[in-house]
Each structure stands twice: as structure tokens, then as C-alpha cells.
Amino acid sequence: MSTTPDTHNKAMVVLSGGQDSTTCLFWAKQEFAEVRAITFDYGQRHAIELDSAIEIAQLAGVQQDLVELGSVFAKLSSLTDSDQKIPASGTDNGSSSGASNSDGQLPSTFVPGRNILFLSLAASRAYVHNCGAIVIGVSQEDFAGYPDCRESFISSMETAISNGLDRPIRIVAPLMHLNKKETVELALTMPGCLEALSLSTTCYNGAVPPCQECNACVLRAKGFAQAGVADPLVVRTSLTGASTHAR
């Protein structure tokens, strides 16, 4: 009898509670027989996304691990430092162009090492739960200049993780070569995904309704507009009058 774990059709999804990770969760449910989710509390100001991730995992019917990372990223980014203002899209520190700002610096919302740590911890849980793949919603087509959203980074991490665990674990990034319009179009093909997106949180300010000023909000709104689809989150919040803000 073989002692090799059956990992072929099991996946661990890194679920932040945002648009991209939610889309990836529903994509994974179509592609894999068994799907789990892992969500990280890393002191992000928009902590409302944790509530979104919990609701979305429940809606999708997947088991979820919530990992608290404490203050490991405290003060390293405007996303983890309440003393810094979240920059508006189009400014140097809130670039929507997918490039560094005019000073050659990454946007202030970049959290150094975040995806390195997330993928390492996801790999640990994937190993324990015999998942042969980690699914993550990064894209080098629509990113804010973050180097840890590039295909070269994902490929390198896949090699390092598989070597470090002595077991092949793929890192799958289904949105890697899609822009936000194409991501919305993909979501439309998957039952239940739009409903889940109505619960998602993208806004860096953690605002409900979305602030529509930060880079994340601007990119999301642009994608839905180009796809000719009303954003289900905006529709839901306009109907319910829900309102909240970052911690």
C-alpha cells in the first residue's frame, strides 16, 4: 500500500476576502475536487476584509483556516500603519499604472514580504492537509507595482517551497495574465461567484460603500465598468445602506 499522500486534486486557496481571491476560490472549486481556504490577519487597516473572507468561505462551503500574524508587518506600509494616509489613485504613492512612482519607489501600500510569508504559511498548511496546489489571486497585468505579484516571483516561490518540503506543490495564479475586466468576465462564468463578490472587500480604506478613491477601488470599478456589469458589492450596499470604515 502506497504511503504517498493523494495531493493531485486538492487545493489551498489564499483568501483575503477581496475580489481577486474570491474569484480564485470559485475557480478552484471548479478545478479541484477538494478546496480549503487560508486567511491571514496581519494587522491590515482594512480588517473588514477578514469578515468578508469568513462570509465568502461559508457561502462557498469550504473549510477555512484563519491565521493571526500579529504585528509582524506593523508600520511597514500604509496598509498596516494607521498614521499613514492611504494614497489616492493616480498619485505617486497610489499608482494605478502598474509601475513604481516617479521617485522609483513602490507604492506606500506595498507590504514588503507579505506574499512571501503568505505563500510559505499556505504551503505549510497545504502540506499538512495533503493539498498539491496553492491558489493565489495575484496578477502582473493589473498590479500596483508590487514585485510579489509577478510571474517570476511565483515561479521562484514554487521551486523554493517544493524543495523545502521535499514534495511538489504547485502555485497556481489563474488571474496572472488577466486584467480586471477579464477577471470580472471570468467571475460571470462561475455559479455563485457574483453573489460572493457582493460580500467582498477591496477598498484599502476598508470603507463600505467603497471609497472609490484608492487604487484598489479605482481598478475594481474600472474592471466592472469595462465588462459592462454592475459591481454586486456596490449594488448590495446601495440597497442595504451598509456602512463601515477601517480600523
Image (spheres, helix red, strand yellow):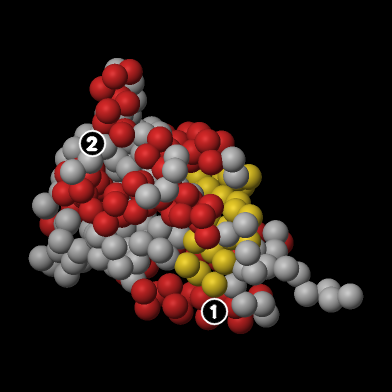
Task: Residue lying at the far right in this picture: please name it.
Answer: 1
Q: Which residue is mark 1?
A: 160
Q: Classify 13 as above or below 247.
A: below
Quick one: label 2, few (<14), some, or many (20+) residues within 10 Å?
few
Which three-letter amino acid code belongs to the residue tagged 2? Ala
Give how far across and how far down residue 7 sits, in percent: 67, 68
Q: Which mark is residue 36?
A: none
Q: Which residue is mark 2?
A: 230
Q: Toward the viewer: 108 or 205? A: 205
Mark 1–mark 2 distance (CA, rounded to whole Å) = 40 Å
Tag count in the figure? 2
Q: Residue 180 is drawn in which quadrant?
A: bottom left
Give how far across and how far down residue 224 sits, in percent: 22, 44
| Residue in the image at 42% along x and 65% along y | 173
Query: For the N terminus, which image quadrant?
Result: bottom right
Query: Disc 2 on helix, strand or loop?
Result: loop
| Residue in the image at 16% along x and 49% along y | 226
Asked if residue 167 shows in the view, the reply is yes
Direction from residue 61 to residue 225 in the image, left or right = left
Which three-letter amino acid code belongs to the residue tagged 1? Ala
- Mark toward the start of the polypeptide (1 vs 2): 1
